[in-house]
């Protein structure tokens, strides 16, 4: 073995957590790599999120030594392999079976580097190694199973507003997967990132996937039969299938890759609305929509002479469903609404809205950019006609979005971008178009980004959307409770039972930009401004707010840091 367990212990003990993570990667870099011919399917370890190959050679005798060899396509996994090999390599079969591997993991505090997905993979590697040893060990050797890093009881400490973490959700493990969050800022502070509502950070797994495509098999999609092109097509198909499953689409053919939520809403407004709307028809939206779900419909109304109408809001920022019939009529052809407000956090009753829209002959278009990372999405159960979201809000790359449509809606909808790939046949004077999804994927796709957003969705599925939602709601409840007690603080929107993990607020006599700037001095990163919702801010009677938005990687300590930074801002600005 190129490094011993004692050397790893000695190195780890002298490093802080951030440097330990780097050392783990360096162990992976230094691990001898398999040649391509050594990476056989029969040697793959089942249960691993990344690909892991493991082989063994055994010596002679009744209790032979076992020589292990392993490799992975993920560097951090290679680092974990290095630790396993240092612990097990060249031990006899009986020594492997009796070796206390969990003590190694505990001493190195490896739990903070192991996501729920990688936990299963590590367990799979340990089980494979012990299985090899068991087949060669003398009769009577201990063969009781080894459980790798079992769950721990949650911390019972806490007071009013304190967060009690979910037993099934290890936020420290989740956070360790995000390189941006495992660094030290100027002044020795750890970053407290509370702007995931604008763009979420990316886990190492997604970063690695982008790098994998760029470094190992990048090619244009749908263009070639050579190995790189075939691999890209396979990866794109897998990403599309994964996304379809994530939102419960009937088929993956109803999922198209786009440039993002804004582009997709424009495609629907122009491609479906432009074909079917006419003078006298009505489009129904809300005042809490992002500009991306207002301006395209405004432009459509101007072009078609349709009328744009708004669903009234309650004083606390929810849809006033008691007044919906005032604006949802037989004239309504499109109901376009956010699933979750990017300012108020308001969660809208999608299934009820869809049913009532369909009752009057309208379609429903859902802007799910904010909701998809935080709560379950089921396009069939909710009977949604169109649904859109972006990759960068669901822990994936920028520059890629998703269009879902019912099959009949996609058939009806005209493409608005024309060129390569989206055609069926081009003649000198006209063209015919391919079926969905190709019909809406003109030109060269954002190939790397589309593949990586599939990986991001898989990462979210691995954690479990329900577990993420529960964790974020605990943070939201704590933050809402504590911020509500700060003098001069106004929090906009409904109570936590009707909102997702977003808080927009304003302190009396303090401009949101000034507050955000002072929070940043304490390492707390929030958003300020109108958040692309000018009509909503007009309704609220303010020009801007400060917004804190939570994600799977945020912790109770982040909530504490936010509250303490606001108190620091009050002292700095001498607010009474």
Image: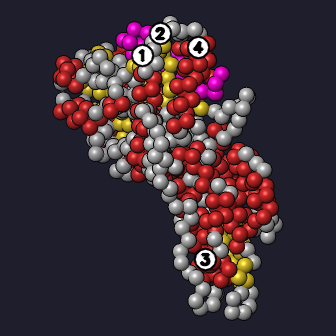
Of circles 1 and 4, the one toward us is 4
Q: Nearer the viewer, residue 292 or 352?
A: 352
User: Left or right of 2: which side holds 326?
Assistant: left
> Of the residues under marks 2 and 3, which one precedes in the sequence?
3
Q: Is 4 situated above or below 110?
A: below
Disc 2 vs disc 1: Cβ atoms closer than 8 Å?
yes
> Of the residues under marks 2 and 1, which one precedes in the sequence?
1
**Does any portion of residue 24 appear in the rendered image?**
yes
Q: Nearer the viewer, residue 50 or 239?
A: 50
Residue denoted by label 2: 508
Of circles 2 and 4, the one toward us is 4
Q: Residue at x 28, y 24 (%)?
A: 319
Q: Residue at x 49, y 34 (%)?
A: 550
* Numbered tag placed on residue 426 in the rendering: none
* Numbered tag placed on residue 490 in the rendering: 1
Q: Is 205 within the magenta?
A: no
Q: Is 531 within the magenta?
A: yes
**Does any portion of residue 240 appear in the rendered image?**
no
Residue denoted by label 4: 571
Disc 2 vs disc 4: Cβ atoms closer than 8 Å?
no
Q: Residue at x 53, y 31 (%)?
A: 560
């Amino acid at each position: 073995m190129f490094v011993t367990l004692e050397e790893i212990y000695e190195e780890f003990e002298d490093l802080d957590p951030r440097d330990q993570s780097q050392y783990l990667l360096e162990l992976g870099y230094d691990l001898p790599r398999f040649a391509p011919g050594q990476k056989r399917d029969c040697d793959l370890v089942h249960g691993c999120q990344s690909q892991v190959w493991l082989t063994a050679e055994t010596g002679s005798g009744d209790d032979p030594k076992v020589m292990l060899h392993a490799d992975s396509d993920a560097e951090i996994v290679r680092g974990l392999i290095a630790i396993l090999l240092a612990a097990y390599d060249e031990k006899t079969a009986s020594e492997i079976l009796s070796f206390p591997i969990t003590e190694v993991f505990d001493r190195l505090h490896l739990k903070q580097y192991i996501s729920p997905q990688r936990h299963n993979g590590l367990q799979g590697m340990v089980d494979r190694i012990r299985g090899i040893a068991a087949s060669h060990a003398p009769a009577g050797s201990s063969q009781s199973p080894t459980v790798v890093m079992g769950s721990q009881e949650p911390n019972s400490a806490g007071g009013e507003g304190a967060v009690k973490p979910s037993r099934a959700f290890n936020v420290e493990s989740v956070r360790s997967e995000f390189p941006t969050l495992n660094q030290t800022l100027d002044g020795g502070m750890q970053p407290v990132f509370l702007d995931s509502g604008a763009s979420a950070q990316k886990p190492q797994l997604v970063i690695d996937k982008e790098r994998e495509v760029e470094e190992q098999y990048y090619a244009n999609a749908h263009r070639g039969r050579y190995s790189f092109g075939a691999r890209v097509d396979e990866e794109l198909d897998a990403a599309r299938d994964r996304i379809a499953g994530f939102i419960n689409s009937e088929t993956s053919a109803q999922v198209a890759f786009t440039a993002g939520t804004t582009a997709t809403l424009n495609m629907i407004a122009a491609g479906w609305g432009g074909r079917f709307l006419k003078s006298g028809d009505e489009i129904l939206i809300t005042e809490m929509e992002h500009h991306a779900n207002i301006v395209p419909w405004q432009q459509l109304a101007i072009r078609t002479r349709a009328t744009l109408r708004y669903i009234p809001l309650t004083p606390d920022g929810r849809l006033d469903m008691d007044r919906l019939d005032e604006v949802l009529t037989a004239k309504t052809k499109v109901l376009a609404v956010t699933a979750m407000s990017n300012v108020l956090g308001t969660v809208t009753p999608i299934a009820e809205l869809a049913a009532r829209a369909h009752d009057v002959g309208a379609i429903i278009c859902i802007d799910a950019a904010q909701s998809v990372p935080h709560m379950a999405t089921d396009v069939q159960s909710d009977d949604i006609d169109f649904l859109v979201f972006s990759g960068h809000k669901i822990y994936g790359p920028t520059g890629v979005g998703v269009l879902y449509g019912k099959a009949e809606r996609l058939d009806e909808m005209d493409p608005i971008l024309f060129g390569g790939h989206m055609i069926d046949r081009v003649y000198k004077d006209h063209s015919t178009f391919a079926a969905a999804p190709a019909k809406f994927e003109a030109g060269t796709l954002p190939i790397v980004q589309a593949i990586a957003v599939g990986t991001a969705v898989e990462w979210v599925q691995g954690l479990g959307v329900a577990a993420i939602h529960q964790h974020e709601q605990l943070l939201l409840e704590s933050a809402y409770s504590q911020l509500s007690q700060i003098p001069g603080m106004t929090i906009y929107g409904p109570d936590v039972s009707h909102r997702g993990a977003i808080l927009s607020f304003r302190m009396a006599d303090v401009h949101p930009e000034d507050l955000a700037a002072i929070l940043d001095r304490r390492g707390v990163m929030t958003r300020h401004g109108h958040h692309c919702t000018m009509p909503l801010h007009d309704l609220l009677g303010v020009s801007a707010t400060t917004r804190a938005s939570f994600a799977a990687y945020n912790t109770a300590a982040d909530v504490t840091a936010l509250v303490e930074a606001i108190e620091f801002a009050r002292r700095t600005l001498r607010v009474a």
